[in-house]
Image: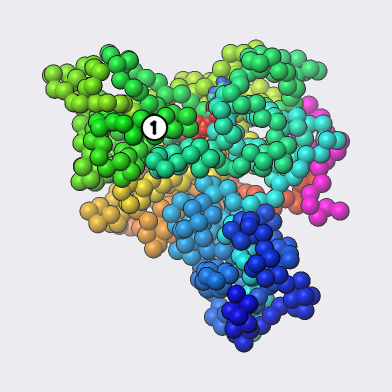
Amino acid sequence: MRRRILKLIPIFLFACKGIRSTCKLQSDLTEEQKKGIIQTAQMLDYNNTQLITYTSFKKPKEGELMPFVIQNGDEDYQIILTRYQGKIYAFGSLCPYDLETDLSEGICFGDKLYCPKHGCQFDITNGMVEGPPSIDNLPKFGLKENEDSIEVYAPLIVPKKIIPQYHFRDYNDQRKVIIYGGGAAAFACLTTLREFGYTGELSYISNDNYMPYDKTKMSKRIKATKPEDFFFRKDNWYSAIAIDAHLGRKISYVNNKYSNTYVELDDSNKIAYDTILIATGTDPVHPPIKGIENQEVFYFSSLDSHQQLKEKLKTINDLSIIGINTMSLEVAQTIRQEYPNIKINIIDPNDESQFQVQYGPELTNLVLDLHVEKGINIYENIKIKKFEKDSIVFKGKKKLKSDAVILFPSTVSPKTEFAEVSDHQFEFDNAGRVKVDYFQRTDIKRIFAAGSCAHTYYYTNGTGHIGDQWQACYNQGMTAAYNMLALNVPWHQIPFTYTEQFGKVLQQASSWPQFDEVHIEGDLKKWDFIIYYGMNDFVVGAVGTPSKQNRVAIVNEGIRCKNIPFLSDLKNGKYSTKDIEAAVRKIKKSGCYKSTLYKFRYDVVPEYNLWTFRDNMSTFYFPYDNAEISAAPKMKGDE
Ligand SMILES: Cc1cc2nc3c(=O)[nH]c(=O)nc-3n(C[C@H](O)[C@H](O)[C@H](O)COP(=O)(O)OP(=O)(O)OC[C@H]3O[C@@H](n4cnc5c(N)ncnc54)[C@H](O)[C@@H]3O)c2cc1C
């Protein structure tokens, strides 16, 4: 190793003397440091190691994502150089979500970088993650721009991702927050609270047996998995930031008398609160099927059921999957790839499957044909008469062998038992979701709701969000946390989701309860397309394959900026995705959302750059009952 470094000396200028004198060799690094997972927000805080200066004689243009290769120990390591508002920035090029996707193939809108695969969003000026599914930041590098070159300062071992900095508990801080539920929204809320300086009591109550995990990964991997593979963070991380966790528990009583607010758990534990987030998600609704008790049935909605299915798959030959939706198709393709000997039948008893209702026949046929090509049997619009011990009987007497069933019902029911154990009169929508405003506030003071148990409004057009998308739920959890801290941030993200079916990635911008028309750009057969979905001529979202242009991210940004042409104008060729990109870039440049190319349909809403709120952190307070918090937590660097 030493020889290799010496060889680099003629090419790279070493950083200042002070840094060199604290140099460490790779053999001196801890195991964590070698793996490149280092808990520090600033790369240059990464002390005790040698900084190497790399020189680039090429400079990025404004908005360009220019890959630049440096060394990471013995390996080449790609970073990105970019320019924003004239200033150059350097940061890691691997998406922290999978540590594989190359972010230099993504797209930048102003200071926001979209991952080309998962749609995670990062602030390029500081590497911080703004939009999931990544929960970690990008490493950021120091640099100096010279007249004809850029010097980039990187440590000998480069961290692949940066775990954000969190605030530890301050026992003088008397505030008390309860997070009820243990999924995407709950995790996002607790992590955002601690990241944004909340140092009060933080209790976490979930009826699940595990601390929060990433459900979206469960359908993508089954065979060689353990529960830990899906955890967002390890247990000691929660202890470090003082999360008071109550697993396998439910709230059985809520005392909301103002002077003495507390909840009682089903183990009789009492926990006081000032503020609660309800994030209890949904439950699948199972239509009655005769004889279902004859088969082993899996619902795939929790990590326990995922692990039980993993055991069952070792022993069966014929599997029935009931229901056609994105999740069931992902599960089918995973099982096909991981257990090639199991015969898989996907059966949908509805006239139109959930997938077809959501995406229309064009995409449905494309995806189902792919599954059939891979040896999966699809039975659409076929009514089930009953289940027997080793088979399914259809109406019309046809029988299929079946050793186990995975059920994906097309309807879900929001879990809002919280309302039943309290005397709060929440407002619900028709589906039983708790109604919240743009700030995730219910109509009951100090009670927030987020995720799939909540009925949230899109800030773009005021329509209710009724989709059950992970990224939306996560962002709503973050939004609840911002507003518990009185930062007044509306839910302003448009969910970007993706699925992978036999190596073919489909990305989705936004969600829509219904559509009446589609417009297809590109070629479905070549898996190179974008489908726009429209309702009353308004574009409500899009699904497409990844492309050099990052067209789905463009549409996502277009919807967020309310800068999307009418569907008819896309259809008649007046505008295309390229024009949406130009329009979004134009408004980003001008710094606010102004009507440029297209007619707006909605009011103009200012853009919220979340990270600028950091400057105001020392003044935040709970807005309720004018109860100012005496000990405003200090931000790092306040003193
Ligand atoms: C296998 C799988 C794959 C998926 N893949 C995708 C995907 O690729 N993309 C996508 O967008 N979405 C996907 N989803 C959907 C996504 O996971 C959900 O939309 C999201 O998790 C909802 O988040 P949430 O916080 O509202 O609720 P959940 O994540 O469902 O969490 C609710 C939590 O509350 C707890 N809880 C419920 N009732 C109580 C109670 N009474 N007391 C205490 N705790 C309670 C539950 O145990 C659970 O921990 C997938 C879902 C599954 C199951």
Side of 634 where 34 appears, left or right: left
Which residue is nearer to you in this view: 289 or 445? 289
The span picked out in magenta is 620-639
Which residue is nearer to you in this view: 520 or 151? 151
Residue at (72, 40) in percent of width and height: 241
Instruction: Give the image location of residue 402, x and y in percent.
Output: 24, 26
Instruction: Give the image location of residue 25, x and y in percent.
Output: 67, 70
Residue at (29, 31) in percent of width and height: 316
Callout 1: few (<14), some (14-19), or many (20+) C-alpha neighbours within 10 Å?
Answer: few
623 in the magenta segment: yes
Q: Main secondary structure of the magenta part?
A: loop
Q: Dot 1: what SS?
A: helix
| Residue 167 visible within the image | yes
Q: How many marks overall?
A: 1
Residue marked by disc 1 = 311
Side of 214 where 385 appears, left or right: left
Residue at (78, 26) in percent of width and height: 625
Side of 96 where 386 appears, left or right: left
The quarter in which the N terminus is drawn is bottom right
Residue type at the position of mark 1? Glu
Measured along the vertical axis of the image, is residue 334 above or below residue 415? Answer: below
Instruction: Give the image location of residue 597, x and y in percent.
Output: 45, 57
Colour scheme shown: rainbow
Image quarter of residue 443: top right
